[in-house]
Amino acid sequence: MSQGAGEGDNVRGPQAAHEAEEIARRLEDPALLAFALNGVFMQSCTRAGLASRRDEIGAELVALAARHGLVTFEVLGHLIRLQARGALADFAAADEHAAAADLLAERHERPLVGVFTEWYRALRLAAHGRLARAEAAYVEAAARLEGAGMPGVERGLPPLTRLCLRLAGRPSSARETAEAVDPAADWGPYRPWAEPFFSLRAGRHAEARAALRALPEPPADLLYEALCCLEAAPALVLGDRVVLERVRARLLPAAGELAGAGSGLITLGPVAGWLTTITTALDRWTSPST
């Protein structure tokens, strides 16, 4: 997953990736093109709502890699499509890509692939509202992360998953959810988005509002929409127009997607539901005199 940086980097990264892609196409080198397409994918989170574009990248990568025996990139293409189709709530297609990735992994001894497909299947349960089963599946998936050599994925993910499970499809439940969050857990890079919930839990609303206002734009990665929703949830409780207006603007391009599902890890439910709740709240707080 690509990480956000400064505004200049957000422009230069995608530009450099596309230039590399063009060079690889001119050279007609399949391995180089597969590598370049991976770079384009890594730079494909410049805003919300780009799951369809990532699906196109994954489809080309699968076809290219299958033709030329590039197993690692074929697996990667299936995982990209698993994530993208999940974000688009097309779980039938996502299931097919999960199965294809697992088959390649078994055939070519790539055990780490199963870590990602297991997380996806827990996400699928959550997306279908089977929250108790999803929670149990997430516990098992988290256990597989330990010692898998992916600290960038592992750190902070278990408590983030529990938070998202409690909020999924319930944008206005931040106050109730805050009672279940654990400030002592290792939230890793997600801690800034958890802090407002800690303050709500302690009844410190001014502190929660300050924490929300201080949040940076989420990193430009596959959890962008999910972190935007985590901003919106406490803002709905606090009646914070500033935060809700900026979150709505960021989420609008992803109105047809499931928040967070593009990561293949978690989901907070349909973005459309969040946008409806945010817009309803903003309209309710607007009086004719304002």
Image (cartoon, rainbow, N blue to C red):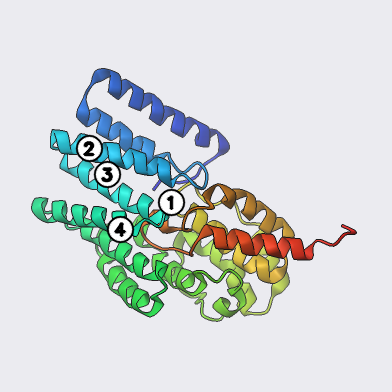
Q: Which mark is residue 63?
A: 2
User: Which residue matches tag 3?
Assistant: 77
Q: Mark 3, mark 4: which one is toward the viewer?
A: 4
User: Which residue matches tag 4?
Assistant: 92
How many marks are shown on the rendered structure? 4
Q: Mark 4, mark 2: which one is toward the viewer?
A: 4
Q: Mark 1, mark 2: which one is toward the viewer?
A: 2
How far is the residue under mark 4 from the one under mark 2?
19 Å
Kindly identify the amino acid type of the residue bearing the numbered disc 2. Answer: Ala
Considering the numbered disc 2 on the image, is that residue within a helix, a strand or a loop? helix
- Quadrant of the frame with the C terminus: bottom right
How far is the residue under mark 1 from the one under mark 3?
15 Å
**Nearer-the-camera pick, 25 or 5:** 25
- Please name the residue shown 37% across and 61% down the image: 265
> Where does the image place residue 123, in percent across and percent down from the top left?
36, 65
User: Which residue matches tag 1?
Assistant: 222
- Please name the residue shown 22% across and 37% down the image: 63
**Nearer-the-camera pick, 102 or 148:** 102
77, above or below 166, in the image: above
Considering the numbered disc 3 on the image, is that residue within a helix, a strand or a loop? helix
- Please name the residue shown 41% across and 58% down the image: 261
Kindly identify the amino acid type of the residue bearing the numbered disc 3. Answer: Gly
Which residue of the protein is positioned furthest toward the right in this rendering?
A: 289
- In primary-sequence order, the first of circles 1 and 3 is 3
Kindly identify the amino acid type of the residue bearing the numbered disc 4. Answer: Ala
Q: Mark 3, mark 2: which one is toward the viewer?
A: 2
